[in-house]
């Protein structure tokens, strides 16, 4: 899900400049003898299917926890998940998958099928981590990175069908870069009864203050503050928005329409009551690195972008993108029966060991152990479709887009609870 902000900005620039990419080598380093090593009692074998694996990447932030403990320094909690195999789609110069494989005797297979069967021809793992984040992949016409999530999932499903059994699958961040692939993945999981989770680490992460929307509340308006790359970080903001909005009276009933506004049109929308500047301003005091808090936000943010979400049963909902000015996610909301503004920071650890990934992994581990998703994947199906429609709206100059496909109803079965305190920060360059 979400790597520390300062590192990702640097990493993204390096990847974009092509400075870390070697010739993309085939990942054919499997060792059949290691694949036969049995899991200890109570352990669950996990196959990690990733696009790229380097220091501080999403693969490192999730998969490395299975071999380096939860604090990524061999001093934390050892999970009951055993990393059984790896498939790595691209191998940049700063790749660490080969070292992980050598240090911990983890076989790297040349294809997804062998990673799931451990070379035996039959499904031999208890869970799958599909982490398609980072790497060199093309962008779609709407500017979304076309990570090979459907291709990966198709290969996983082939093994399930051939083996006549399924295991839980976690898909990092959104389900796909487009609605058609996302819906296919979801429908296939439903058809085959595959326990499926996806989404952002913002769903379970810390909140400061530790508050949530009241259950069955009559919400009037809700707003999330977003920063960073619009598509990749905008998804996190949509996940935070859904986590809060789904608790409203009637639960989540889907999205009727979306619109993406840019520049002066954002502040004009505020004047017209599309969103409240009071809510936007209320998020700023929670930010660890506030900038110019003594000025109105509309005087500070020079290139704003607004995601306008029209829910089927209300409330007014928006994501305000402020570029690189603020480096955190926050949200504010107001109830119909209470004029006060409530707000909170979605706190992530901007340092090693990026403990919000550990909180996310708690939910994934629960699913792999129980066979039941920790939170409904329908929420991420909704945010995936919303992001795709919003990027289409942006490409088309801010056109309002009706979204009948997003009339997705679900009742939140998971309730956010404040996680235990995070471990101490360490520099990103350390283990």
Image (cartoon, rainbow, N blue to C red):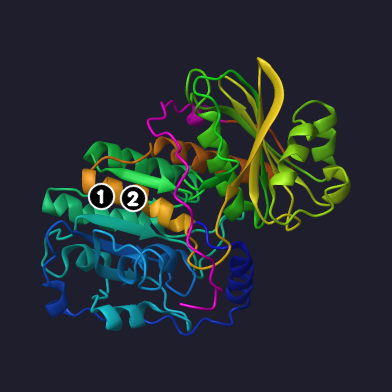
Q: Residue at x 25, y 75 (%)?
A: 106
Tell me the element at label 2.
Answer: helix
Compared with 268, 52 (above or below) is: below
Answer whether residue 27 is visible to the viewer in this image.
no
Residue 109 is left or right of residue 138, and the answer is left
Residue 241 is left or right of residue 85, and the answer is right
The magenta stretch is 403-431
Q: Give the residue number, with chain letter if any, for mark 1.
A: 368
C-alpha gap between disc 1 and disc 2: 6 Å
Q: Quadrant of the C terminus?
A: bottom left
Looking at the rendered structure, the number of numbered marks drawn on it comes to: 2
For mark 1, does the 10 Å Cα neighbourhood hold few (<14), some (14 to 19), or many (20 or more) residues?
Answer: many
Residue 150 is left or right of residue 264, and the answer is left
Instruction: Evaluate if marks 1 and 2 touch, with contact meaning CB atoms under 8 Å apart.
Output: yes
Q: Residue at x 47, y 23 (%)?
A: 251
Q: Give the residue number, with chain letter if any, for mark 2.
A: 364
Tell me the element at label 1.
Answer: helix
Please name whichever residue, 353 or 14, is drawn nearer the observer in this view of the structure: 353
Q: Residue at x 14, y 53 (%)?
A: 162
Q: Is residue 404 magenta?
A: yes
Q: Residue at x 23, y 43 (%)?
A: 371
Residue 272, percent from left and from top: 82, 26
Please name whichever residue, 375 or 25, is drawn nearer the observer in this view of the structure: 375
Residue 47, percent from left and from top: 26, 63
Residue 355, percent from left and from top: 47, 59
């Amino acid at each position: 899900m979400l790597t520390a902000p300062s590192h990702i900005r640097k990493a993204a620039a390096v990847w974009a400049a092509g400075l870390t990419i070697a010739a993309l080598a085939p990942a054919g380093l499997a060792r059949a003898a290691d694949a036969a090593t049995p899991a200890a009692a109570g352990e669950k074998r996990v196959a990690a299917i990733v696009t790229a694996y380097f220091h501080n990447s999403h693969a490192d932030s999730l998969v490395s926890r299975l071999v380096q403990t939860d604090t990524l320094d061999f001093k934390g909690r050892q999970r009951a998940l055993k990393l059984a195999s790896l498939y790595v789609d691209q191998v940049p110069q700063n790749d660490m998958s080969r070292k992980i494989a050598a240090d911990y005797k983890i076989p790297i297979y040349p294809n997804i099928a062998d990673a799931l069967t451990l070379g035996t021809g039959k499904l031999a793992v208890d869970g799958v981590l599909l982490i398609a984040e980072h790497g060199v992949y093309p962008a779609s016409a709407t500017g979304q990175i076309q990570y090979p999530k459907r291709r990966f999932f198709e290969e996983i499903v082939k093994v399930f069908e051939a083996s006549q059994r399924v295991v839980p699958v976690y898909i990092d961040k959104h389900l796909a870069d487009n609605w058609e692939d996302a819906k296919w993945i979801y429908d296939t999981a439903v058809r085959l009864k595959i326990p499926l989770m996806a989404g952002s680490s913002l769903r379970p992460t810390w909140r400061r203050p530790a508050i949530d929307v009241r259950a069955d509340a009559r919400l009037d308006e809700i707003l999330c503050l977003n920063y960073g790359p619009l598509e990749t970080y905008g998804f996190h903001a949509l996940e935070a928005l859904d986590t809060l909005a789904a608790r409203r009276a009637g639960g989540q009933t889907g999205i009727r329409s979306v619109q993406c506004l840019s520049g002066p049109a954002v502040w004009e929308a505020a004047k017209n009551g599309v969103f409240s500047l009071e809510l936007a301003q209320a998020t700023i005091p929670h930010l660890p690195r506030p900038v110019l808090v003594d000025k109105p936000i509309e005087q500070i943010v020079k290139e704003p972008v607004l995601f306008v979400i029209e829910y089927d049963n209300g409330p007014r909902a928006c994501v305000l993108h402020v570029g690189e000015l603020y480096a955190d996610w926050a949200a504010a909301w107001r109830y119909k029966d209470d004029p006060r503004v409530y707000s909170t920071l979605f706190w992530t650890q901007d340092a090693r060991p990026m403990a919000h990934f550990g909180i996310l992994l708690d939910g994934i581990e629960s699913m792999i152990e129980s066979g039941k998703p920790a939170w409904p994947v329908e929420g991420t199906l909704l945010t995936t479709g919303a992001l795709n429609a919003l990027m289409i709206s942006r490409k088309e100059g801010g056109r309002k887009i009706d979204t009948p496909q997003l009339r997705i109803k679900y009742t939140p079965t998971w309730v956010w609870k404040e996680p235990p305190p995070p471990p101490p920060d360490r520099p990103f360059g350390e283990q």
